[in-house]
Image (spheres, grey):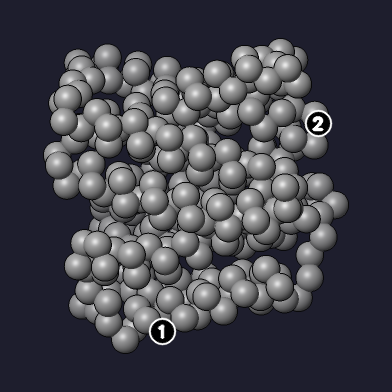
């Protein structure tokens, strides 16, 4: 499948996933339940797909399995922890999130060095338009970015680095003949185990309200589709930075969708940010 189509599917599925997770939070769903559904259910779905597909296998070399284990622990599990902390401590949470999601700019320039990936001027310009207008979109008037207590910066930059390294690791494994499905199965499985260990140490249980069961299943399904489309796009794209930048650009669509569904504010500043990000996406895809 064409990498542009896969990236568009990643873009769409990320928006749906965000809406479902936000609905779950609005219904006071335990964070542990949400986290479990976003990793455990996709690992099960991936395992089922591997089992019914004769061309796929769980077989993997010990070296590659170790790489996935390290990536799951430090880049995925720890990366999400740092991301949450960065947003939690920042006076302007949206700004912290935007910095974290800007890792596409780093991978755009590292991909040619590590994987001999292609890179062109319009792709570079489109990526930086997305980041610049993403900052415009996320900036909130009256909320200071730099204060006396700036530990959010360390958490935010840590998440930025972790997410960049996660996609670089995935691309390395795909180049070395590891199937996207096999990679996702082990990655999701390891992160699920780490999450369960954390819940055990915190003496918390996964309590699931029956009324939320369908929502949790939908979150798991969309997490599976989002991660599948994104990693298939990373495998096929001429430069993983383009996929990552487009994923960053989903913040523009989320802003509009949130205004429609959740009645979030949509002012002129945010509209300018949305329009600028849209231009950046057009430059990447044309």
> Does residue 205 appear anywhere in the picture?
yes
* Residue depicted at 58% across the width and 58% down the height: 8
Quarter of the image where one finds residue 98: bottom left
Residue 271 vertical position relative to residue 249 in the rendered view, above or below:
below
Instruction: From the image, tell me which residue sits under label 1.
Output: 272
* Residue depicted at 41% across the width and 55% down the height: 15
Closer to the camera, 122 or 50? 50
* Residue depicted at 32% across the width and 21% down the height: 198
> Does residue 241 appear anywhere in the picture?
no
Closer to the camera, 89 or 138? 138
Residue 141 vertical position relative to residue 233 in the rendered view, above or below:
below
* Residue depicted at 51% across the width and 40% down the height: 225
Which of the labelled discs sits on residue 47, or is there none?
none
Q: Look at the image and tell me in which quarter the C terminus lies.
A: bottom right
Give the class, few, some or many, for how many residues have Cα within 10 Å of label 2's Cα (few <14, many ≥20). Answer: few
Quarter of the image where one finds residue 110: bottom right
x and y, in percent, of residue 202 in the image = 22, 20
Which type of secondary structure does the marked residue at label 2 adopt?
A: loop
How far apart are the two marked residues, 2 and 1, measured between alpha carbons? 42 Å
x and y, in percent, of residue 185 in the image = 57, 23
Instruction: From the image, tell me which residue sits under label 2.
Output: 176
Residue 17 vertical position relative to residue 15 in the rendered view, above or below:
above
Give the class, few, some or many, for how many residues have Cα within 10 Å of label 1's Cα (few <14, many ≥20). Answer: some
């Amino acid at each position: 499948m064409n990498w542009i189509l896969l990236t568009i599917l990643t873009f769409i599925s990320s928006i749906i996933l965000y809406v479902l997770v936000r609905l779950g939070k609005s219904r006071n769903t335990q964070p542990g339940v949400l986290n479990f559904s976003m990793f455990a259910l996709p690992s099960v779905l991936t395992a089922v797909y591997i089992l019914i597909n004769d061309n796929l296998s769980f077989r993997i070399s010990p070296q590659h399995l170790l790489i996935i284990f390290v990536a799951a622990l430090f880049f995925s599990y720890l990366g999400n922890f740092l991301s949450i902390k960065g947003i939690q401590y920042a006076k302007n949470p949206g700004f912290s999130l935007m910095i974290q999601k800007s890792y596409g700019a780093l991978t755009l320039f590292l991909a040619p060095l590590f994987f001999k990936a292609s890179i062109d001027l319009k792709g570079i310009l489109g990526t930086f338009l997305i980041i610049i207008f993403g900052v415009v979109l996320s900036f909130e008037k009256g909320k200071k970015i730099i204060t006396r207590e700036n530990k959010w910066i360390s958490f935010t930059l840590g998440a930025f680095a972790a997410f960049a390294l996660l996609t670089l690791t995935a691309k390395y494994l795909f180049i070395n003949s590891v199937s996207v499905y096999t990679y996702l199965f082990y990655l999701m499985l390891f992160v699920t185990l780490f999450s369960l260990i954390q819940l055990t140490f915190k003496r918390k249980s996964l309590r699931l309200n029956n009324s939320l069961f369908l929502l949790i299943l939908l979150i798991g399904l969309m997490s599976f589709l989002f991660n599948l489309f994104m990693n298939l796009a990373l495998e096929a794209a001429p430069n993983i930075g383009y996929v990552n930048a487009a994923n960053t650009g989903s913040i523009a669509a989320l802003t509009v969708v949130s205004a429609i569904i959740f009645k979030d504010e949509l002012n002129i500043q945010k509209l300018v940010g949305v329009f600028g990000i849209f231009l950046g996406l057009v430059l990447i895809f044309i």
